């Protein structure tokens, strides 16, 4: 059998070359590591040194320590020696929520209305006609009285002009008295064409009778709606307000909604 020899790479020459390559690679690795470290060091120096240089000031300046840099850049606050803490008082707080703002506005509006009402009341009081020396009750003892004691007869319901009352002409300021006892149903400084007027509902011998008094002087009303009055009680003063052509009392009498002529009614019932 012939002798067959198989050659491999493990020849003496290959064996001799391998240790040389290993030594070369062993030398290359440290060099590469040193190069990497050197590059990193250069990068750090490039970043850190300018910042450090700027912190220490220009060339030739005194060196600055890290403690001094920290001290210069530290935040601080100066408190006056006489400063004192103030207490929080609820009354000093300002309104910030919508509800508080609306409540504040409502309170201010109410205060303004109250001030206006007080001013109006004061003005009305100062302008109110004096009733000094005026009889508070008309003479007589009957259930029905004449509303004015001294007057001149003027236009009445029979004029054909739709006039529903009797005009009792008298000087401005002449006292007006309730024609009968009853309850005041209306009392105002202006009621349509009546001007300053009062209306009273009375029960006279079982019959409900309404009497109306118009064209009074502003501010002269002595009774208010809901008040109870007695026959002959002073209720106001003759004037010239509303649809009036001169100083007089417009006196009306109504029964069941129907208009009566006051002149014959008073003549038959007043006493």
Image: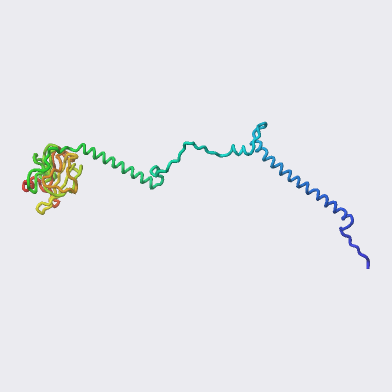
Q: Position of residue 21 (x, y in %)?
A: 83, 51
**Residue ranking furthest to the front:** 81
Residue drawn at x 41%, y 45% as measured from the top left: 96
Camera-side residue of 119 and 188? 119
Observer-nearest of 207 and 73: 73
Q: Nearer the viewer, residue 236 or 97?
A: 97
Q: How is the image coloured?
A: rainbow
Q: Residue at x 43, y 41 (%)?
A: 86
Q: How many marks?
A: 0
Residue 210 location (% of width, % of height): 14, 49
Judge whether 102 appears above or below 132 on screen: below
Residue at the farthest right position: 2
Is residue 181 something that shows in the picture?
yes
Residue 66: percent from left, percent from top:
63, 39
Residue 55 lies in quadrant: top right
40 displayed left or right of 4: left
1 relative to 259 in the view: left or right: right
Farthest residue, direction bottom: 1
Q: Quadrant of residue 94?
A: top left
Quarter of the image for residue 178 reads top left
For residue 159, say whether it is visible.
Answer: no
Q: The N terminus is located in which quarter?
A: bottom right
| Relative depth, front residue between 82 and 218 | 82
Q: Residue at x 16, y 37 (%)?
A: 130
Residue 155: x, y in percent? 11, 41
């Amino acid at each position: 059998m012939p002798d067959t020899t198989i050659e491999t790479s493990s020849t003496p020459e290959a064996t001799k070359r391998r240790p040389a390559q290993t030594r070369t690679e062993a030398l290359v690795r440290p060099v590469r590591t040193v190069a990497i470290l050197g590059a990193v060091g250069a990068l750090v120096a490039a970043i850190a040194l300018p910042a450090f240089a700027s912190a220490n000031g220009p060339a030739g300046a005194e060196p600055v320590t890290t403690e001094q840099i920290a001290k210069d850049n530290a935040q601080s606050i100066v408190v006056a020696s006489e400063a004192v803490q103030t207490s929080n008082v609820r009354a000093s707080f300002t309104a910030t929520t919508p509800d508080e703002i609306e409540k504040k506005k409502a309170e201010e509006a109410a205060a303004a209305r109250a001030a206006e009402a007080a001013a109006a009341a004061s003005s009305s009081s100062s302008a109110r006609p004096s009733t000094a020396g005026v009889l508070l009750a008309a003479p007589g003892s009957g259930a029905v009285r004449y509303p004015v004691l001294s007057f001149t007869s003027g236009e009445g319901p029979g004029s054909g002009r739709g006039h529903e009352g009797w005009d009792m002409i008298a000087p401005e300021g002449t006292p007006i008295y309730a024609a009968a006892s009853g309850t005041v149903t209306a009392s105002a400084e202006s009621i349509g064409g009546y001007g300053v007027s009062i209306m009273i509902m009375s029960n006279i011998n079982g019959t409900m009778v309404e009497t109306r008094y118009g064209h009074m002087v502003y501010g002269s009303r002595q009774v208010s709606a809901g008040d109870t009055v007695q026959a002959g009680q002073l209720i106001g003063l003759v004037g010239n307000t509303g649809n009036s052509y001169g100083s007089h009392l417009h006196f009306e009498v109504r029964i069941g909604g129907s208009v009566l002529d006051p002149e014959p009614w008073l003549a038959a019932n007043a006493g």
